[in-house]
Image: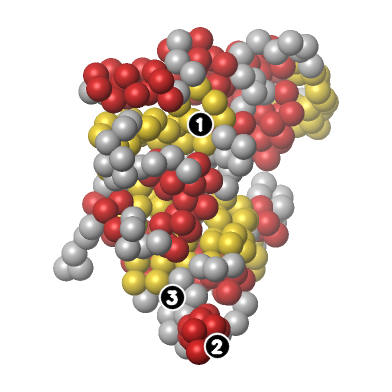
Amino acid sequence: MGFSLRRILSGWITNDVAIDLGTATTLVYVKGRGILLNEPSVVAIDNRSQKTIAVGREAKRMLGRTPDGINAIRPMKDGVIADFEIVEEMLRAFLGKAQKRRLLIRPRVIVCVPSGITAVEMRAVRDSVEHAGAREVYLVAEPIAAAVGVGLPVDTPAGNMVIDVGGGTTEIAVIALSGIVCNSSIRVGGDEMDDAVVQYIKKTYNLMIGEQTAEVIKIKIGSAFPLPEETEMEVRGIDLVAGIPKTIKVGSAEIREALKEPVALIAEALRSALEKTPPELAADIVDKGIVMTGGGSLLRGLDALLREDTHLPISVVSNPLECVVLGTGKILDEIEHYEKVLIRYSKE
């Protein structure tokens, strides 16, 4: 009885939090309660008062549709903070939404960061999270969080390879003994794929489309590998010659062509990581295969293309969008066990 009362009280006093602060989406996991927030990393600001009007899903609906007085911003770029103050506002709003009640003690927070992050970018993440209301901030590399989320034994000497394709970065890493043995971190992800679709349609059809439309095209008919049945869809945009709205039909084979460059960069990064892998760990990877996580891994045929390219078993996990935050949450729940995977830093 005393123990359960203590647990209830500790839940009221503080709620430790794990955050997957992504370029496209932010997910918040609260200790003992699971994923309580999954929203786009977008903030809408009133230009006159500089006040936040909307955050997350509501703000994303405003992207590309705002009048002069309002600005919808994505404050994360390539997996790192592009606008420090706006990220702070966004985190404060998300933490408030996820926790829903006033806590007596500020929470401990674990945030996952790209493995290629610089010391300056790391400090920006820490400071933003602290200013948003955290008592202590721990950082963990995204590929390790993804591996823990998938259930891979990261603390054993056996090699595990993870490809995490996010909105702004692709993280490829070989993990053994609670650390990254070799990795390849490139700033190419879902955003670059969307941009490639925008540029292709502009160049081929003289039609200007928004990034949200490009994302819909990528999800509906985009692929990295020939599809069993090719499809097409209607696309609306602004005719750059006539300056009026226009509708065209676009096929999946064309979109595959548009996505060729970002997909090739991901394949190249995978080859680069494999070249750096020690022979003993390479043997483990041949046996166990490679797991793919992150929203970008949902691009149809990306796993098939990488399989053909490397002749290795590659599979996409069942919940690619959530496994990084679930892994960060698991590290949070068993922080003593996973102490070695946390990125150390000293406060100057």
Residue 156 in percent (x, y) is at 31, 40
Q: In this orientation, does residue 1 appear?
A: yes
Q: Where does label 3 land, which residue?
A: 107
- Inspect the image, locate mark 2, and give the three-letter code of the amino acid beneath it: Met
Q: Are marks 2 and 1 in contact (CB under 8 Å)?
A: no
Crowding at label 1, few (<14), some or many (≥20) Cα neighbours within 10 Å?
A: many
- What is the x, y in percent for residue 282? 31, 21
Which marked residue is nearer to the observer: mark 3 or mark 2? Answer: 2
User: Residue 273's spot in the image, x, y percent?
Assistant: 32, 24
Q: Earlier in the sequence, mark 2 or mark 1?
A: 2
**What's the CA distance linking mark 2 and mark 1?**
44 Å
Q: Which residue is mark 1?
A: 292
Q: CA distance from mark 3 to mark 2?
A: 25 Å
Which residue is pictured at 49% across the width and 75% down the height?
A: 15
Name the quarter where the N terminus is drawn.
bottom right
Up/down of 319 relative to 267, above or below: below
Q: Quadrant of residue 235?
A: top right
Amino acid, disc 3: Pro
Q: Residue under label 2, please give it.
A: 1
Q: Is residue 127 left or right of residue 104?
A: left
